[in-house]
Amino acid sequence: MNTDTLAHALARRITLEGPLTVSAFMAEALGHPRHGYYMKQDPFGTAGDFTTAPEISQMFGELIGLWCADAWQRLGMPETVHLIELGPGRGTLMADALRAASVLPALRAAVRVHLVETSPVLRERQRVALTPLLAQPLWHNSLDDIPPGPSLIIANEFFDALPIRQAQRTVQGWSERLVDLDPDSGEDAPRFRFVLERGGGPGRTLVPESLRDSPVDSIIEQSPASQAVARLLGARLAAQGGAALIIDYGYDGGPVVGDTLQALRKHAFAPVLESPGDADITAHVDFAALAAAARAGGAQSHGPVTQGELLTRLGVVQRAQALKRSATPKQAVDIDAALERLIGAQAMGTLFKGLALTSPGFGPPAGFEP
Ligand code: SAH
């Protein structure tokens, strides 16, 4: 029997320490050094578990590259600028952005590329994708490790992978939602189930005042990890200058009641607790919370605007037309399909949103003008 699995490791931990927070479960499922979902495989593409915007079309990364070029000009074209990507996946977005940014040779000479990535498998993919374009990208485990200086920062589908905590309303009040061993599962094949923290522990503190009176069984979420990163981004931009573009799926307007934790395996939803380490686990991003944390760090926030609106303002329709001029009929069909996936309201256009953070005085960056 193979007991060297993440399920066994989590079962041993729960036996020793008691039930885990949703946040601890999620962090282990995604980031366990050997068994974590992102640590052991490349999950992208049609053969993988999901597809992201940069993998759908080169247009996405190209427009972000032009957004960076515009932001660099607004910063007064500093001679050195850190181009930082959080969670770069296969490196596709960065490669497309760098190709587009080479319209400004002085910018290409100014950028130092930093990739914040914890997965060795994906670091290798990024190295392969970027080698033709770059002498040497630098990898970091955390934003904290990047040297000071003005920066342009990109994060696409990064924050949805950061752990969340959940609280649930019971007749007695709010309790934190925890992950425990299912007592019906054997030692050979541990299974997990949700339980509630007993007796007025920290669960209550997760709930904003406005939602305290929600009906019994309501679930609310908070991502302290996301807020910590956003605050750090805000502090960096305020102190060193620069702009950040965060794109992800999620909601605006403050915390709401709802359980958005989901697991994806081979392009289909799977039960969240079923196969830790073998499914992608994400939660929707609370954009208002990210913006507030970044402002608390000293930056200004702009938006969010929907991905459809943002890409349209950045010129995605014109870019698609330009690409179609030199395309075969089959390629033209693919370009139209990709455009629809990126900006269509039923596809990624509305659920996905862009939030910009800037140093004070920068003003609204491209795509975020009122
Ligand atoms: N931006 C890419 C990939 C999104 S998937 C795209 O759009 O295709 C999430 C990425 O974040 C992966 O590269 C994953 O390895 C990385 N990641 C997840 N949690 C992380 C963490 N805590 N620190 C650094 N990188 C992380």
Image (cartoon, helix red, strand yellow):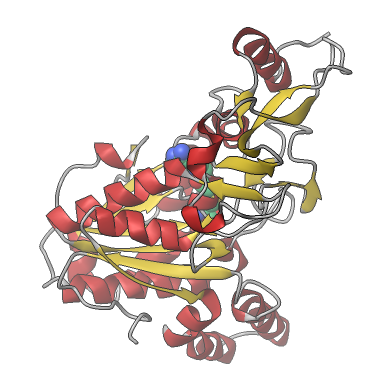
- In depth, the one of 228 and 35 nearer the eye is 228
Location of the N terminus by quadrant is top right
Percent from the top left, x then y, of residue 43? 65, 45
Quadrant in which residue 118 is drawn: top left
Q: Nearer the viewer, residue 299 or 336?
A: 299
Horizontal side, residue 22 vs residue 270: left or right: left
170 vs 36, left or right, is right
Q: Total label count?
A: 0
Asked if 235 appears above or below 204 in the picture, the reply is: below
Q: What residue is drawn where x is 53% and y is 39%? A: 204
**Residue 205 visible to an observer of this rendering:** yes
Q: Is residue 99 visible?
A: no
Residue depicted at x 41% and y 67%: 355
Q: Quadrant of the C terminus?
A: bottom left
**Residue 262: % across, % down:** 70, 48
Residue at left offset 66%, top offset 42%: 168
Residue 363 position in % (x across, y down): 22, 77
**Can you tell which quarter of the image residue 73 is in?**
bottom left
Q: Quadrant of residue 241?
A: bottom left
Percent position (x, y) of residue 228? 36, 43
Instruction: Name the one closer to the observer, 358 or 155.
Output: 358
Left or right, 294 with reference to 215: left
**Residue 156 appears left or right of 151:** right
